[in-house]
Image: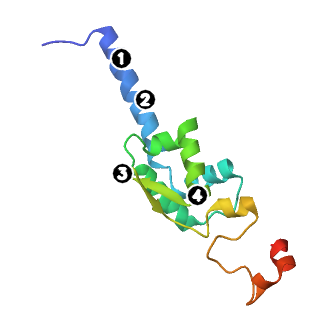
Amino acid sequence: MRTLGRRAFIVTVSLVTRWFAAAPHAQAFTVDDFLALSSRLTGHRDLPRQTAGIFLNALLATPGIDRARLARPDAALEEAIVVAWYTGVHQVRGEPRVVTHTGALQWRAMGKPAPGTCIGPFGTWANPQRVAQR
């Protein structure tokens, strides 16, 4: 019968302990956690939950990104989250997919409505002063 040496035992216990410590937190990263992270990164507290769910699922489908990495994002991942919220677009296998056009945060940042949307009642476009107030 072969026995574990002291060093092998310590390494094994250390690895198993790390795995068990990380597992509950990794599983606990939810849409609400993603909304909190997104709010912190973008500065907006009123982000739509449905859009957050789509962005979260798209990130989790990306190779190398899991719930544990989302719980402790690096600068590149944080940038990807901010870009998704401001453009309304996420990547699927390297291809851009529009999640929201009118809800993209870039329009709020510019203080303008999204192209193709109404900015007021009929004829608003004909009144330059009213258009400038938007």
Distance in Å between CA atoms under marks 4 and 1: 46 Å
Foreground pick, 98 / 130: 130
From this viewpoint, is residue 9 visible?
A: yes
| Left or right, 77 with reference to 8 | right
Q: Nearer the viewer, mark 3 or mark 2?
A: 3
Give the structural element (helix, strand or loop) at label 2. helix
Residue at disc 4, secondary structure: helix
The answer to which of marks 2 and 4 sits earlier in the sequence is 2
Q: CA distance from mark 3 to mark 2?
A: 31 Å
Question: Tags 1 and 3 in contact by the CB under 8 Å rule?
Answer: no
Foreground mark, 2 or 4, reads: 4
Residue under numbered circle 3: 93
In the image: residue 60, left or right of residue 77: left
| Label 2: how many Cα within 10 Å (few below 14, some 14–19, many 20+) | few
Q: Hey, which residue is sitting farthest left in the picture?
A: 1
In percent of width and height, residue 3 lies at 20, 12
* Amino acid tagged 2: Arg
Query: Which residue position is annotated with label 2?
Result: 18
Residue that label 1 marks: 11
Q: How is the image coloured?
A: rainbow
**Which residue type carries mark 4?**
Thr
Distance Cα–Cα, label 2 vs label 4? 37 Å
Q: Label 4 belongs to which residue?
A: 87
| Mark closest to the chain's N terminus, 4 or 1 | 1
Taking the image as drawn, is residue 73 in sight? no
Quadrant location of the C terminus in the rendered image: bottom right
